[in-house]
Amino acid sequence: MSLDSFVIKAQTLALDEELKGARIDKIFMPRPTEVVLSIRGTMGSGRLMISCGGTNAGVYMTALRPENPPQPPMLCMLLRKHMQGGKILSVTQPGGERIMMISFTSTDELGRVSEKKLVCELMGKRTNILLLDEEGIILGCVRKVDYEMSPDRAILPGLVYRLPGGSGKTSIYALDRDSIAMLLKGVQEGDDIMDRFEGVSPQVARELVHRGLDEGGMADVLYDLAQGGGRPWLVKRKGADFDFSALDISYHQDGESILQEDFSSLMDSFYMARREEDLKKNLSSSLKKTLENHRARLERKLGKQRQELLTAQKREDLKQRADLITSNIYAIRSGDSKAVVTDYFTEGMPTVEIPLDPELSPQQNAQLLYKRYTRLKNAEEALMVQIEHGESELEYLESLLYQLEQARVEKEIRELSLEASQAGYVKKAQNVKKNKPEKQGAIVPKKYVTSGGFTLLRGRNNRENDHLTMRMAKGGDLWFHARNIPGSHVIMVLEGREPSVPDIEEAAALAAFWSKAGKSPRVPVDYTRAKHVKKPTGARPGMVNYFEFKTILIEPKDLKEGE
């Protein structure tokens, strides 16, 4: 990612002009590495994204309305204390570093006004956001760096903030055009340029060499970039967004550069898709791992219970041996280690040998076998209940994992995380106040229309499935679900009419498509009247029983969403 000093320089000048004098109304931290300032100025209202995330680091105006966590982080509370209601004084780039500083006025509890700074360091793995007081002391930061991690530059609250140390090379920002040209003499490769200057990215260096410019031409370009003359270029490769730059990049054989309106709109659109994908990955990965661990433990437990059930089902042999001892007890002496008896239960009445405990009497040996038989009989009944419960729990876990795989936005993942927490799979956050539980979003099932004009409603998760089937559906409506497969509940709203076969097939195809078997060539889908769908007492969300149903084997197919 080429968020180099030239991009930062041009963006700093643009933001300084746009934001100077703007009022900071609200402050949010939708993610641990993001600060969003809601600002109001002469150019209207807007939101400033300040991010030190690895894949979307930058400072830019954004059209995104990010979803905020239920409880703001401690750093967010600190920023609100010092920044809210303040006025932005300037946006600067100190010494050509990959750093932006936002200076603002701050009013304390006594009404004293001072100037403080919000610093965004945009230096690859060392990206950070820091709040400084009027004396340059660190009040808070996203990433703390102690002396063991960085002996030369610790970043901790209470320490004086220091700019990063230089590499020893000459800063491109400290030179005039002629000095730059002089240092460029003899340059053959991009690495030569980077070896002579600090502040020039590999992308710009390679582009200058690719253009075949002499030292004078290179000096003109570099001096203009250092003065903030960079323009917002979107770099595409093979038709897809690849990078962005302050310079028109032409050295990619399969690429092109497209000039954008400004750096903020360029960065906002460029990061949007990556941000959502990264967010989904970060939020869902830990939840997925937790659910998969629960599934693996449950599968092992079920395997053990099924093995115990097989053992319990072989208990008749114990009762038969006890009966044989009892019927032949006259021929067995105390102290015998085995009994040779006639098997009256087998055709031909063969002689069989039964091992005995010599320390027990024949009657006691028989009673011991009867007790083991009774214990296994009771165990079978308990195991069957436990296995049934475990299989239902496994089905529910499979549904959560499927829905997590299908989730497209942060809201859907958070709702699944909340559901998993309520089910006991995920520990609740310790710092969440008991009297302020996380609010669940409104339930708005996806809506479709069949070719015959019937409305179809589809639940996207267990909570929506429950609400759709048990609350929204009328008794005469049709209910569809892939047979024995995690997936969406689909309701066909009839309103007194009866659907045709094509309508039923379209609804079944939709239910098949939005199931775990959605990529199979054919999927069995059950359908019945909604009044025949019942929720067992104490069942997990989305888990139902149904009867008087029909099954259709259908090719999965999605439908266009309706109004």
Image (tube, helix red, strand yellow):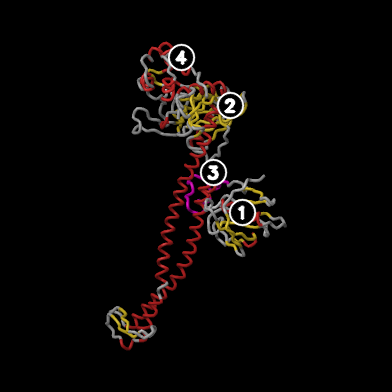
Residue at the right extreme of this rendering: 496
Callout 2 crowding tier (Cα within 10 Å): few <14, some 14–19, many ≥20: many
Based on the picture, tell me whether residue 507 belongs to the magenta stretch. no
Per the model, the C-alpha gap separating discs 2 and 3 is: 35 Å
Is tag 1's residue or tag 2's residue first in the polypeptide sequence? 2
The numbered dot on residue 408 is 3
Q: Earlier in the sequence, mark 3 or mark 1?
A: 3
Q: Which residues are magenta?
A: 419-439
Percent of width and height locating residue 434? 53, 48
Q: Residues within 10 Å of mark 1 (few under 14, many from 20)?
A: many
Which label lies toward us, 2 or 3? 3
Majority SS type along the magenta span: loop
Residue 84: give x, y in percent of width and height. Answer: 55, 30
Q: Which mark is nearer the camera, 1 or 2?
A: 1
Compare marks 4 and 3 and give the one earlier in the sequence. Answer: 4
Q: Is residue 344 left or right of 416 when viewed as pictured?
A: left
Indicate the quadrant where residue 330 lies. Answer: bottom left
Give the residue pinned by disc 2: 23
Please report contact status of discs 1 and 4: CB closer than 8 Å, yes or no: no
Question: Is residue 295 in sight in this rendering?
Answer: yes
Left or right, 263 with reference to 360: right
- The dot on residue 73 is none
Q: Looking at the image, is mark 1 or mark 4 earlier in the sequence? A: 4
Q: Which image quarter holds the N terminus?
A: top left
Circle nearer the viewer, 4 or 3 = 4
Residue displayed at 37% across by 33% down: 146
Which residue appears at 28% of the width and 79% of the height? 359
Residue type pointed to by label 1:
Val
Magenta span contains residue 429: yes
Q: Report the Cα–Cα distance between label 4 and label 2.
A: 38 Å
Q: Nearer the viewer, residue 175 or 238?
A: 238
Residue placed under numbered mark 4 in the picture: 220
